[in-house]
Amino acid sequence: MTGTRIVVGAAILHRGRLLAACRSAPAALAGGWEFPGGKVEPGEDETAALVRECREELGVTVRPVRRLPGAWPLGKGYVLHVWLADLVSGEPRPLQDHSEVRWLAPAAVADLDWLAADRPAVDLVAAVMGEPATGKRVIGDESLPMRR
């Protein structure tokens, strides 16, 4: 993946629930739900970036557990890697780039309009939680069929 920049997303699990964050910016993504995270800076490893981004965006400390299999293209040379993470301390609140955060029970994971880039990872996280993610449209890619 030479020339590809990595963006990390945190699938934060705590007490059997998943944390989702609603984008406030940029306008094209506003209102879509995602795993919080951001770009890995030069010289930084993915786990350090995940911890930093969660602190900056949510005011929490997380412990990266493991990376989910897969890498999802975001366009413009970026690729998304999603990590399962445990909440270590703090109460998540939307500090940067988000208007809302929400804890989701396994059965509610499919109820949000997830950003297209996060959708494949949402399905994997839902499987880890023991609940299929089905039935909702995907923000950013209206051409995807709804799953039944």
Image: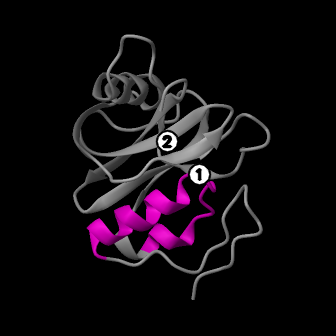
The residues colored magenta run 108-130
| Residue 40 appears in the picture as rendered | yes
Give the residue drawn at x 62%, y 31%. 77
Label 1: few (<14), some or many (≥20) within 10 Å?
many
Q: Amino acid at mark 1?
A: Ala
Magenta-colored stretch includes residue 117: yes
Task: Please report whichever mark, 2 or 1, sits nearer to the chain's N-terminal start.
Answer: 2
Badge 2 crowding class, 10 Å Cα cut-off, few under 14, some 14 to 19, many 20 or more, is many
Against 5, residue 22 (above or below) is below
Q: Main secondary structure of the magenta part?
A: helix
Q: Amino acid at mark 2?
A: Leu
**Disc 1 target residue:** 117
Is residue 32 toward the left or the right of residue 83 in the image?
Answer: right
Residue contact at pointers 2 and 1, CB within 8 angstroms: yes
**At which x and y percent is residue 110?**
51, 72
Q: Is residue 28 magenta?
A: no
Q: Tell me the residue that label 2 is attached to.
A: 80
Indicate the secondary structure of the residue bearing disc 1.
loop
Query: 2 left or right of 147?
Result: left
Residue sitting at 79 percent across and 38 percent down? 27
Quadrant housing residue 124: bottom left
Taking the spot 44% from the left edge, 67% from the top edge, the residue there is 123
Alpha carbon separation for disc pair 2 and 1: 8 Å
Question: Does residue 88 appear in the picture of this structure?
Answer: no
Q: Residue furthest front?
A: 2
